[in-house]
Amino acid sequence: MIKVALLVRLQAKPGKEADVIRFLEQGLALANAETTTPVWFALQLGPSTFGIFDAFTDEAGRSAHLTGPIAAALMANASDLLAEAPQIEHVDVLGAKLAS
């Protein structure tokens, strides 16, 4: 059962929006390789505002994700792509419907 999640807000630097989109699209392959990340979404919230929502069955999965390859890639590319540091929120999932 999905219990915890991360909500990450990303603000692209002017002119870097397409690069952020490509970065997020490439993140899907990394997310698919993470066995403790059953839910992962890359989002476009506005013209230059993006997000990532990922959810986990427990705190151990969330912690593993935060030290995994997606987080490392995000932090390595943040200064080039983003106008500000990623805003990472730890959230609790109160309910979820996941269809296969």
Image (cartoon, grey):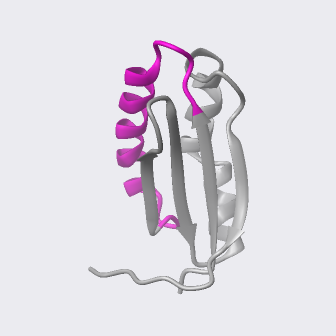
The furthest residue to the left: 100
Q: Nearer the viewer, residue 68 or 79?
A: 79
Q: Is residue 6 left or right of residue 41?
A: right
User: Does residue 100 lie above or below 82 as drawn?
Assistant: below
Residue 88 lies left or right of residue 24; in this view the side is right
**Residue drawn 46% across and 38% down?**
46
**Residue 55 appears at what percent x and percent y?**
55, 67
Range shown magenta: 11-37
Magenta segment includes 95: no
Residue plotted at (65% across, 31% down): 75
Question: In the rendered image of this protein, does residue 55 appear above or below residue 89?
Answer: below
Residue 90 or 33: which is nearer the viewer?
A: 90
For residue 32, side relative to residue 71 (left or right)? left
Q: Residue furthest front?
A: 46
Q: Quadrant of the C terminus?
A: bottom left
Q: Which residue is pictured at 59% across the width and 36% down the height?
A: 10
